[in-house]
Amino acid sequence: TVLLLLGGTAVAALLVFRPAHTQLRALEDAARRFGGGDLTARAPTGGSDEVAAVAIAFNRMADDLGARQQQLV
């Protein structure tokens, strides 16, 4: 029973946290690229959770900074 409970918990954790982990990795990659000078880097915004909301905010910030940089050139 304990092994079944542990196995079920592990599977549930993977199903719940794996998509968020993937979204966070993509957001981290976009932030690193943007910080490295790639002003076209954007984060994927799929989903409706908190990670997607942060990705949307990141993309808005990136759009704003890109527009400001274009005004300076």
Image: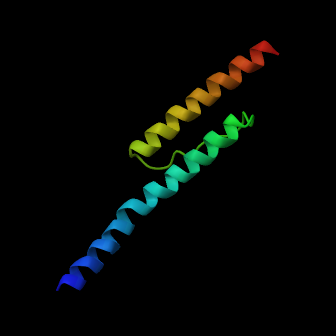
- Tell me if 24 is positioned left or right of 72 in this view: left
Q: Quadrant of the N terminus?
A: bottom left
- Tell me if 41 is positioned left or right of 19 in this view: right
Q: Residue furthest front?
A: 2
- Colour mode of the rendering: rainbow
Residue 58's place in the image compared with 67, above or below, is below
In percent of width and height, residue 11 lies at: 34, 74
Q: Which residue is at a point 44% across and 38% down the rendered structure image?
A: 53
Q: Which residue is at a point 51% across and 40% down the rendered structure image?
A: 55
Q: Quadrant of the C terminus?
A: top right
- Residue 36, located in which quarter of the rendered image? top right
Please name whichever residue, 66 or 13, is drawn nearer the observer in this view of the structure: 13
- Tell me if 30 is positioned left or right of 20 in this view: right
- Residue 34, located in which quarter of the rendered image? top right
Q: Which residue is at a point 66% across and 23% down the rendered structure image?
A: 65
Q: Which residue is at a point 29% across and 80% down the rendered structure image?
A: 7
Residue 25's place in the image compared with 2, above or below, is above
